[in-house]
Amino acid sequence: MAILIDENTEVVVQGATGKEGSRAVRLMKEYGTKVVAGVTPGKGGQEVEGIPVYNHVQDALKDFPNVQATLVVVPPKFAKFAIKEAIENNIRFINILTEGIPIKDSAELIGLAKSKDIILSGPSSVGIISPGKARVSVIGGENDQVNEIYTPGPIGIISKSGGMTNETAWVVKQAGLGQSTVIGMGGDQLVGMDFVDYLELFEKDPETKGVVIFGELGGTYEDKIAAAVSAGKLTKPIAAFIGGTFAEQFPKGIKFGHAGALIEGERGLPSKKKQLLREAGVLVAEQHHELGELIKNAINK
Amino acid sequence: MRLYEYEAKELLKKHGIAVPESQLLSSAEPPKFTVVKAQILAGGRGKAGGVKVCSTPGEAAQAIQEMLHSTILKEKVDKILVEEKVDSNSLHYIAFTYDTDTGGPVLLYSDQGGVEIENKNITKIPLDPGCGIYTTDDNKVPFDTWPLYQVFAEQDCRLLEINPLAIVNNKPIALDAVIDLDDDAFYKHEGRTYPPRTPGAGTMSEREQKVKTINDADHRGTIKYMELDGDIGFLAAGGGGSITCMDALLAAGGKPANYTEYSGNPPTEKVYELTKVILSKPLKGLWIVGAIANFTKVDATMQGVVQALEEIKPDFPIVVRRSGPNEKEGIQLLEEAAEQHNLNLQVFGKETPMTQTAKIITEKAYGNSN
């Protein structure tokens, strides 16, 4: 098993005819993901990488009623329209690669998805992969590299940074462990699914024995993990690295890393996050490369 | 984009929010009012002498003379807002922003507006992300917040903060205003004509300004650079990777000469220019590092590094850890350049975890390798 996607998940790609969209379709198909259709308004009737393109999500659903997931890779201007279309058509899982969506639109879409129990991952998500089964979006890049880094196994991974997703999966693999599902959570300040939402899914997944987290300065998503663990909602071992401790030595207001990495006053300090996580019983790695051994020892106890 | 106070107040006025009578001066003209405020982007202006409440226009004229073209919080004062004095003993704090706890917009409120707001009790009220109404009955705000929410939402603000907001004759009036516009939403507001600005620009070093200029001149990929006091040059790829490596370098006892990140597959030329800026400081070592890239081509970016190294031929140790598309070709480029120019350079691929090479460069740079 895995979470959210597997070899049976039928996927559509919104924005499939664009440069990034068609590359995503190719990478996903090569990996074995069931990409059944693309959606681009005005391009209905065309083909991309051997799949049919439709004008609207509902048109694609007429021919492929079993679609359960969509990848959104449209320009930011059209993202709200595209994501609303996916929500209105009750697609269970929406992964958003698009960067630069206005935060007001994100907030509205996140609220809308929650009210319909739809899983919104991203924006600015690098994607999700259940190794050996399926991948949605561009996570890992070309498939020869993907196959080197991502192998099936017992560890779930959630990364706030898209660029650190490969590296985090790699240190886990170097400890001799494969992954159940790996998720790029999205670098924006506001994202749909946060660490705890994914952790709750991993909690229910029998294949996942432990979860590795890449967090960073800013926001409060990591604080929520500490609260959920303390409340007894999460029982599997968790190992976390929180990047950006060095930034505490610099004046407030300087932006490092992502948009989500902005420290708001006393909130969002990495040292505070690490303290909260440790107090709750989460294993905290001081160095990123320690994550692999930390989670390995924890699941073998 | 952070707005100056006078720009923020113009926006508020446009939406029917009351603000004090004022005049905007960029030369020493006779003032009609007595509150003199330097127009700078940095916070904490009041404490730094950027706000003078005078009792006569003559006193205000003197304050304007002193403040105009002075430097406050490392920012040059080019404009001064002169306002009428508003007397009120009912001062409030109100702000709208987005919050990761609630996953949507929130209203922040305190009935004790004014300086040092950080130390006062602030109530957080979650708002419905669609229509903006309160999602709690716990409403302690004694005035109608709807007009301010309208500004926040319609103008696509990431932050709208009024501190203080005074109540005069039962009507709210915004005595100060901080607005951060969402850069991602500018396409929705075509008429906007705010001149470009860089918060903290006055505090930027020559090297920092140079990298910003190089970056702005070419939209492909992004490079960032921040000068620090140490002696190990730092050239890192990706936002998350860069902050992770900075942590590792400090933990290993290395003193970084700069912070950098490059991302989004920048062209060779951009990486070349960035490397040259990094190498323009006196260094004891250079660390070139990055996580396993998804699409950024290792050979193309390393080509830029190699060009800069061939030009400058540094004699200090260089440690490289890079992996991703075309990694073999990238590593080969570096090794060839090292041999040809007799560089003290060691290259690692993904078999060595990124953060482990922090210790290697630190030991080499400071000469206590054993």
Image (spheres, coloured by chain):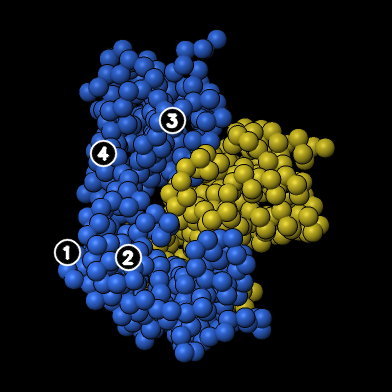
Chain colours: A yellow, B blue
N-terminal of the pair, mark 1 or mark 2, is: 1
Relative image position of residue B240 (x, y in whole percent): 49, 45
**B91 or B140: which is nearer to us?**
B91
| Marks 2/4: CA–CA distance | 29 Å
**A191 or B303: which is nearer to us?**
A191
Relative image position of residue B79 (x, y in whole percent): 24, 63
Label 2 sits on residue: B37
Q: Residue under mark 2: which chain is it in?
A: B
At label 3, the amino acid type is: Pro
In the image, what residue occupies the spot 71% across and 53% down? A226
Label 1 sits on residue: B27
N-terminal of the pair, mark 2 or mark 3, is: 2
Mark seen at residue A248: none
Label 3 sits on residue: B256
At label 4, the amino acid type is: Glu
Query: Could you tell me which secondary element the residue under label 4 belongs to?
Result: helix
Q: How many circles with numbers are drawn on the protein?
A: 4
| Marks 4/1: CA–CA distance | 28 Å
Q: Residue under mark 3: which chain is it in?
A: B
In screen coordinates, is A166 left or right of B311? Answer: right
**A247 or B203: which is nearer to us?**
B203
Disc number lying in front (1 or 3): 1
Q: Is residue B56 visible?
A: yes
Query: Could you tell me which secondary element the residue under label 3 belongs to?
Result: loop
Instruction: Name the quadrant containing residue B347.
Output: top left
Q: Residue under mark 4: which chain is it in?
A: B
Instruction: Name the quadrant containing residue A201.
Output: bottom right
N-terminal of the pair, mark 1 or mark 3, is: 1
Q: Residues within 10 Å of mark 3 (few under 14, many from 20)?
A: many
Disc number lying in front (2 or 4): 2
Label 4 sits on residue: B206
